[in-house]
Amino acid sequence: MAVSLVQPGSITYSTGDYNTGSQYPLFPYFFEFYGYSISVLFLGFILALVIAVVLIMITFQLSVKKRTALMKLSTILVAVPDLFVIAMAQLFIIFLFKQTGILFFDVVGAYERPFILPLITYTILPTIFLYRTLTLLFDEELRKPYVELAKGKGLTDFRVLFVHVFRNGLMGLLYHSKMILAFMLSNLIMLEIIFNTRGITWFVYHHPTPEIATVSILLLAVPILLFEQGMNKLKSSIVGGEEG
């Protein structure tokens, strides 16, 4: 296996039984699956973050009682299994198809990769997770002395929330980036297998060789490590700017 990793061009995959099936070069064919998974992973993260931030800004305009109720609801929803969410999304599209005769999105993939429905489904649990995390962070920020000081200077509640609390809350979210990525990767595995989306985890599942599994892990690790480096630099610049 070590030789194969040094010379990735020599890695092959089988279309049938590993010993008797036809062997084909892994690259560049593998990049089709890799590109799909990376697109879903990072587009899902961006979409989930945007939706969570919008919901947070709406939530903190509500009363404390309503915010508490929403927080309890998000705690329950974040514990919902990803398998249940995927199944419900598929059933909902099938229900709409029966009612309207229009198939809005492909439910599962065959020779073509469905994209919109898997992306929407993939975004649901991370959105709830990010919403719950940001709610805790924002609530903690609102209890700090600088909030009362800012209000004492005549700043409106919305300005304090949007300018000061929002920035510090997102800063706190950066420290949870590893946990968020781990959460999203675990959802991606289940999503690709059930939707038959022919992504990287689907490929490894159907071609379970040590070489392919290792290459997949390494290729997934590269953008994630770059993302982590970017988050670390962003944290350093924010902290450095505050100290300056």
Image: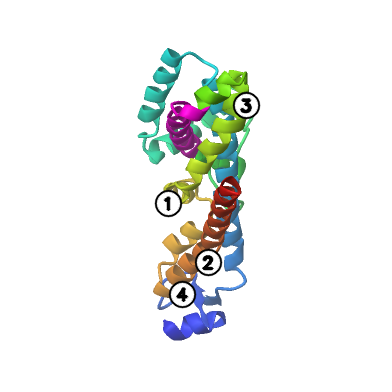
Look at the image and name its color scheme. Answer: rainbow
How far is the residue under mark 3 from the one under mark 2?
A: 41 Å
Q: 157 or 125, which lies in front?
A: 157
Q: Amino acid at mark 4?
A: Gly
Q: First in sequence: mark 2 or mark 1?
A: 1
Disc 1 from disc 3: Cα separation: 38 Å
The residue at the point 40 percent across, 19 percent down is 68
Q: Which residue is mark 2?
A: 219
Give the residue at mark 4.
21
Which three-letter amino acid code belongs to the residue tagged 3? Answer: Gly
Name the residue beneath numbered marker 3: 101
Q: Are marks 2 and 4 in contact (CB under 8 Å)?
A: no
Residue at figure coordinates x 46%, y 74% from the top left: 21
Do tag 3 and tag 4 residues touch (Cβ < 8 Å)?
no
Residue position for label 1: 182
Crowding at dot 1, Cα within 10 Å, few <14 / some 14-19 / many 20+, comes out as few
What is the tally of numbered marks visible in this picture?
A: 4
| Secondary-structure class at tag 2 | helix
Report the amino acid beneath label 2: Leu
Position of residue 170 measured from the top left corner of the image (x, y, whole percent): 54, 39
Query: First in sequence: mark 1 or mark 3?
Result: 3
